[in-house]
Image (cartoon, rainbow, N blue to C red):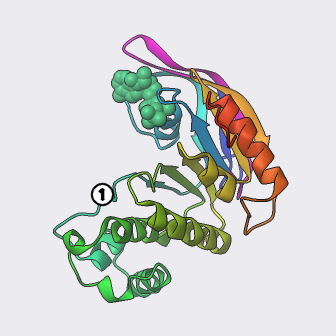
């Protein structure tokens, strides 16, 4: 049966999920239109990863009720690159996709992420940032309608993260997937997302629209104001907030 929803739309309808009788997500409702970039913020244990994994169709052992669906082709990006060490970088990208045009597209993507000269090497010879760039290229090669990203930059140093933000934004502007990005980083969410959800105890506690054009400036008054609001929501009170 064909889906009545548009490719790229993400929907939660009264969605709940438990592990071994412990409820982690509580009756969530959400409509994400195609192409929207949504960041998921929340304290540790608030259920961000559980929600993303549910949308990715993972954790089959969990008990779920209600609906959770990401419509169309879905790619997932994790904190670790999950590149297969016995395949070259290029072969990691094209695994399972054999056509010559796919290899050409993969080569172009590697150029875009600055890894043109690394196509033939083993992933083990790459730095952490290079691995994540390769993983980003792999996740976008299939031109997904929905990109589910779970702290993809969480393990990177601050400078590499900044470069990855610019790169992700450029790639998203070109390919236009719907993005759900789990992050602990308030600034990352403000730099990248159109919409920021705050999860608390497995519920969507806040839903903010970020009406700022790209590229964003952290010294813009609206940026600073929303930053202070989000930090307070997350229980962080600082002299900077
Ligand atoms: N596979 C699982 N089995 C049992 N409990 C789980 C499983 N996955 C998640 N949980 C529990 O669900 C709760 C929410 O975890 P989740 O990883 O979704 O939170 P999070 O907001 O992503 O946290 P963090 O920011 O620390 O990654 C936690 O109490 C966690 O122990």
Q: Nearer the viewer, residue 142 or 38?
A: 38
Residue at 77 percent of width and 41 percent of height: 208
Q: Quadrant of residue 80?
A: bottom left
Q: Is residue 215 left or right of residue 74?
A: right
Q: Can residue 62 be seen?
A: no
- Name the residue located 23 percent from the left edge and 63 percent from the top edge: 84
Please, what secondary structure does the residue beneath circle 1 have?
A: loop
Query: For disc 1, does the CB lie below 8 Å from ligand 1?
Result: no
Q: Quadrant of ligand 1?
A: top left
Rendering coords of residue 169 (x, y %): 62, 67
**148 above or below 83?**
above
Can residue 63 be found in the magenta stretch? no
Residue 146 at what x, y percent from top left? 58, 55
The furthest residue to the left: 86
Looking at the rendering, which quadrant does residue 203 occupy? top right
Density class for disc 1 (Cα within 10 Å; few <14, some 14-19, many ≥20) is: some
Place residue 132 in its image quadrant. bottom left
Q: Horizontal and vertical percent for residue 113?
A: 47, 78
Q: Quadrant of the N terminus?
A: top right
Tell me which segment is drawn in magenta: 15-37
Q: Which residue is mark 1?
A: 82
- Magenta stretch mostly in which secondary structure? strand
Q: Nearer the viewer, residue 48 or 66?
A: 48
Give coordinates of residue 68: x percent, y percent. Answer: 59, 34
Quarter of the picture holding the C terminus: top right
Above or below, 66 against 174 in this view is above
């Amino acid at each position: 049966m064909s889906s009545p929803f548009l490719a790229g739309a993400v929907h939660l309808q009264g969605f709940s999920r438990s592990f071994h009788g412990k409820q982690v997500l509580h009756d969530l409702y959400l409509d994400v239109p195609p192409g929207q970039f949504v960041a998921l913020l929340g304290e540790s244990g608030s259920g961000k990863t559980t929600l993303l994994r549910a949308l990715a169709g993972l954790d089959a052992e969990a008990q779920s009720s209600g609906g959770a669906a990401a419509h169309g082709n879905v790619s997932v990006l994790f904190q670790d690159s999950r590149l297969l060490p016995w395949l070259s970088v290029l072969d990691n990208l094209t695994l399972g996709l054999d056509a010559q045009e796919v290899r050409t597209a993969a080569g172009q993507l590697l150029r875009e992420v600055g890894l043109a000269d690394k196509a033939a090497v083993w992933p083990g010879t790459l730095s952490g940032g290079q691995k994540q760039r390769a993983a980003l290229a792999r996740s976008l090669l299939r031109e997904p309608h929905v990109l589910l990203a779970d702290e993809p930059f969480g393990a990177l140093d601050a400078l590499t993260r900044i470069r990855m933000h610019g790169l992700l934004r450029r790639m998203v502007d070109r390919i236009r997937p719907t993005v759900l990005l789990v992050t602990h980083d308030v600034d990352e969410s403000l730099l990248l997302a159109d919409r920021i959800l705050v999860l608390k105890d497995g519920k969507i506690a806040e839903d903010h629209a970020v009406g700022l054009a790209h590229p964003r400036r952290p010294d813009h008054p609206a940026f600073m104001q929303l930053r202070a609001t989000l930090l307070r929501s997350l229980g962080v009170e600082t002299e900077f907030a």
